[in-house]
Image (tube, grey):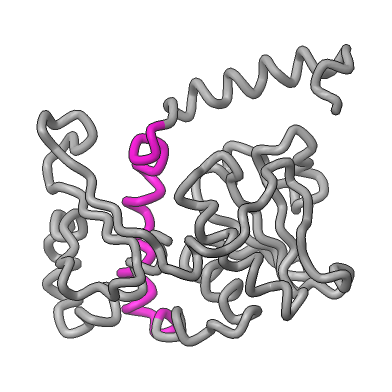
């Protein structure tokens, strides 16, 4: 998704990395012609307040035909993957309430049917447990993408995407981000997406989401209202 943009942009503009880092505002405007047609094209303005700027339009391109055609998944945090789930190599913590994120999750889940190496955990589920996921609380994993290796190691941002893609035979997509300068640029671009993800997808601010989740938890604690 957004990280595909980051990797593609970083790779195609390697020769301009120094200039880019000297001008942070350039990270808010990605050249559309440099991106693969299968990647999201997310163009952010260089204004100080891009979300509230009148007349501003977000341009988002579908992640890929594969993602669009992938089977729709349930959001209750169920693990729809290979029967050999006990052999997972990496656990993906994803936001099941994020429509754009789910395109990528569905694509990875579809690929994982042939590998069974990824365990999918929906952090938006009422059953999400930080204790079972290296004590990563809901607010933390909502801020940026996190993944957990089978040995307990926590990875995030570009590295998380790279590790996930490697497990389903798509390691080449993020291979170039192993080169530190490129990885740094990709992380910076992803940071912009992560910061404005909720606004881009038309969702309430983080504070409101956390408050609603807290109230829902209090209601569910002493009743069966949240149980199916």
- The residue located at (75%, 40%) in the rendering is 128
Image location (x, y in percent) of residue 49: 18, 34
- The answer to whether residue 70 is left or right of residue 60 is right
Task: Name above or below for residue 143 compared with residue 36.
Answer: above
Please tell me in which quadrant of the rendered image residue 173 appears: bottom left
Front residue of 157/23: it is 157
Which residue corresponds to the image point at 33% horizontal and 61% vertical from the top-left?
A: 40
**The one of 96 and 88 positioned closer to us in this rendering:** 96
Placement of the C terminus among the 4 image quadrants? top right
Query: What percent of the width, then of the height, locates residue 77?
Result: 74, 46
Viewed as shown, does residue 182 lie left or right of 152? left
Name the foreground residue: 214 vs 22: 214
Q: Main secondary structure of the magenta part?
A: helix
Q: Nearer the viewer, residue 73 or 172?
A: 73
Q: In the image, what residue occupies the spot 39% across and 43% down?
A: 197
Number of numbered discs visible in the structure rendering: 0
In the displayed structure, does residue 83 sit left or right of residue 54? right
Query: In x, y percent, where is residue 178?
Result: 45, 83
Verify whether residue 80 appears in magenta.
Answer: no
181 magenta-colored:
yes
In the rendered view, would you say 138 is above or below 65?
above
Q: Which residues are magenta?
A: 177-202
Left or right? Give the position of 194 relative to 144. Answer: left
- The x and y percentages for residue 182 are 33, 78
Quarter in which the N terminus is drawn: bottom left
Query: Which residue sits at x=49%, y=24%?
Result: 207
């Amino acid at each position: 998704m957004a990280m595909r943009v980051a990797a593609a942009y970083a790779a195609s503009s390697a020769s301009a990395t120094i200039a880019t880092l000297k001008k942070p505002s350039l990270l808010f405007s990605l050249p559309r012609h440099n991106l693969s047609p299968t990647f999201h094209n997310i163009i952010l303005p260089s204004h100080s307040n891009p979300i509230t700027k009148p007349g501003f339009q977000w341009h988002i391109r579908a992640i890929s035909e594969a993602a669009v055609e992938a089977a729709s998944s349930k959001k209750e945090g169920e693990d729809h993957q290979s029967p050999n789930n006990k052999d997972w190599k990496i656990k993906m913590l994803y936001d099941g309430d994020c429509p754009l994120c789910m395109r990528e999750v569905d694509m990875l889940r579809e690929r994982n049917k042939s590998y069974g190496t990824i365990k999918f955990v929906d952090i938006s589920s009422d059953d999400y447990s930080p204790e079972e996921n290296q004590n990563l609380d809901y607010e933390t994993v909502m801020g940026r993408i996190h993944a957990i290796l089978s040995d307990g190691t926590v990875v995030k941002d570009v590295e998380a995407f790279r590790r996930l893609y490697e497990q389903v035979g798509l390691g080449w997509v993020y291979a170039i981000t192993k080169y530190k300068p490129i990885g740094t640029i990709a992380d910076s671009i992803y940071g912009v997406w992560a910061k404005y993800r909720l606004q881009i997808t038309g969702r309430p601010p983080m504070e409101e989401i956390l408050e609603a989740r807290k109230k829902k938890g209090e209601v569910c604690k002493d009743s069966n209202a949240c149980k199916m």
